Amino acid sequence: MTGSADRTHMARAIRLAALGLYTTDPNPRVGCVLVRDDVVVGEGWHQRAGGPHAERVALEAAGAKARGATAYVSLEPCCHHGKTPPCTDALIEAGVARVIMAMRDPNPLVSGAGLELLRAQGIEVGIGLLEEEARRLNPGFIKRMEQGLPYVRCKLAASLDGRTAMASGESQWITSDAARRDVQLLRARSSAILTGAGTVVADDPSLNVRLAARDLPGVEPDGPVRQPLRVVVDSRLRTPPTARMLNLPGLNLIACLDPDPGRVAQLEAAGARVRVLPAGRGGVDLDSLLRFLARQEINEVLIEAGATLAGAALQAGLVDEVVLYLASHLMGDAGLGLFHLPGLELMRDRLPLAIQDVRRVGPDLRVTALTV
């Protein structure tokens, strides 16, 4: 049985887990709170892959006070040897009396096994408290484990009349400094940023995180800022070896159909990894690309691309979430649109979205919607 105090402590564990938003990749974000006699005796969160898990951080903080305590964990404790020893062993050895977890670990190496191991040792176990909140912490890890695909966000910026560029092609800058800073936070939590060769050729983007560590909650002020993998969908290898992103910190992947040896050699010499993938409708098969990225432990992908690639991903059912920044100006009906969506002719052809959040970001609006 769980009560209001249990909910309070689990909510704290979930808030702690969120401190790992920008650092734990490819691991899940997890928080833990230890409580004995209604007093918090230890707490912690998983800070980065290869580092101690949340449970071990909390147990170290609690010391001997962990004996007889209740552990509130946002994700089922691991029970296998990875880069760190099993957390179930640590909880058992510390003598905790009760473990309340928000959700099962979707990792097949753990799913349900950690829970049963604790029960077999006589520890009282509860599961499902604030599960929806816990799932929202790790959409990419969960989807990768359950479906073999990363969680995909598509970020766009437009005028209030839905234009991403003027008829001339001019597009800098549509949104405010505040909105562009908010995009940096989206990049910082992402495992990879996906764009198309057309965007690279036309705009020569950096697609990197330009925030300092002190600007990212949960990151040590002088610590490193993780750069997402930059991925270019480039069927015919049009990316120039002089592209700006190839000279920036972080890794670059170019997905192509045409493995021209000369072009591949030039791009790899410039710092890119080139991967040949199956053909899909109109170019590189996006489903194959995303499944390849999932096998590389990519949890969350942020699409920052033009209307063609964004529309293709949306129509293929590969986008989970649309994040749209709307600026308070009009750019005219001759401007470029958000998505290229051929074949939508009748009202019944519309692609539905479920709006989850609308808020002000500086002078702009940010609309977050899920695909349905």
Image (tube, rainbow, N blue to C red):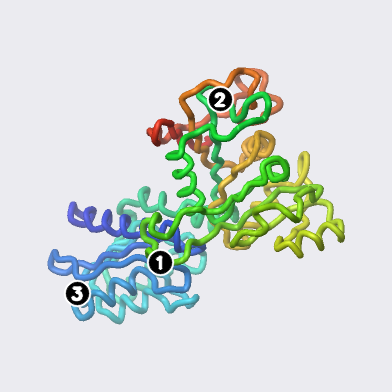
Q: Is mark 3 on a helix, strand or loop?
A: loop
Q: Residue placed at 31% from the left, 75% from the top?
A: 91
Residue that mark 2 sits on: 162
- The residue nearer to you, when weighing 196 against 340, is 196
Up the image or down, 136 lies above or below 251; here it is above
Q: Which of 150 and 242 is in front in this view?
A: 242
Residue occupying the point 40% across, 36% down = 361
150, above or below 162, in the image: below
Residue 108: x, y in percent? 51, 65
**Mark 3: which amino acid?**
Gly
Say left or right for 191 vs 170: left
Question: Do residues under tags 1 and 3 come within 8 Å of each other at their CB atoms?
Answer: no
Instruction: State the image coordinates of residue 95 (x, y, percent, origin top left).
Output: 25, 78
Residue beneath label 3, please?
68
Residue at screen point 54% across, 30% down? 158
Q: Which residue type does callout 1 highlight?
A: Asp
Mark 1 or 2 closer to N-term? 2
According to the picture, the residue beneath numbered tag 1 turns out to be: 222
